[in-house]
Image: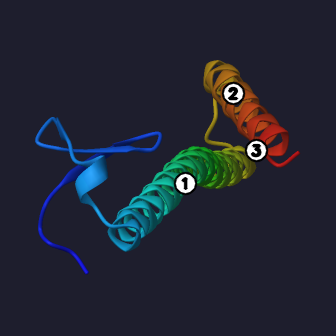
Amino acid sequence: MTDGKVYEVKGNSFKNDGADVTETLSEERKSEIEATLKANNKAKAEAEQLQESLKAQQKELKKTKEEAEAKQEKLEEQQEALEKKIEDKEDARKDFLKAKKSLDNQQKKFEKLKEKGKLSPNDEEKWSEKLDDLEKEFEEAKEKMNNLNK
């Protein structure tokens, strides 16, 4: 039974407000005080152990969270790189198709004019240069597209 007083226990002596009260306490009361002290010390030790365990768990959670965030960031970077690669491939494909269409159209136009005899030697030379340039653009676009598709 507690009497609301705070006792300080050192070895076999009991003090209350700094005064030694060992001789005034019954053996039963001494046992109660020691049992209470033992229970409090045990509870304190358990609380400290629980606190340490919680700290360790928090540290582990923080580490796991940081690792997950790092993985997430890496995945986002990979996703962006893939999207850019897809966009580059699509742009190269469009450039290739545009160069091919332009070359085909100009070759047909050249052939049509040639068949009708509407080209002077000067015109034929200009057309030849123009078609060479278009052929070069087409080959460059084709090479770029093929390199991106590797």
Which of discs 2 and 3 lies nearer the camera? The answer is: 3
In the image, residue 137 sits, relative to residue 92, either above or below, namely: above
Residue pointed to by mark 3: 145
Q: Earlier in the sequence, mark 1 or mark 2?
A: 1
Is residue 1 rendered to the left or right of residue 62? Answer: left
Residue pointed to by mark 1: 49
Picture coordinates of residue 150, whole percent (x, y): 88, 45
Q: CA distance from mark 1 to mark 3?
A: 65 Å
- Crowd class of label 3 (few under 14; some 14 to 19; many from 20; radius 10 Å): many
Picture coordinates of residue 55, whole percent (x, y): 49, 49
**CB atoms at circles 1 and 3 under 8 Å apart?**
no
Q: Quadrant of residue 125?
A: top right
SS at badge 1: helix
Identify the amino acid type marked 3.
Met
Does any portion of residue 102 appear in the rendered image?
A: no
Residue pointed to by mark 2: 124
Is residue 111 rendered to the left or right of residue 79? Answer: right
Picture coordinates of residue 82, whole percent (x, y): 65, 51
What residue is at 61 percent from the left and 41 percent from the top?
A: 118
Q: CA distance from mark 2 to mark 3?
A: 31 Å
Does any portion of residue 79 appear in the rendered image?
A: yes
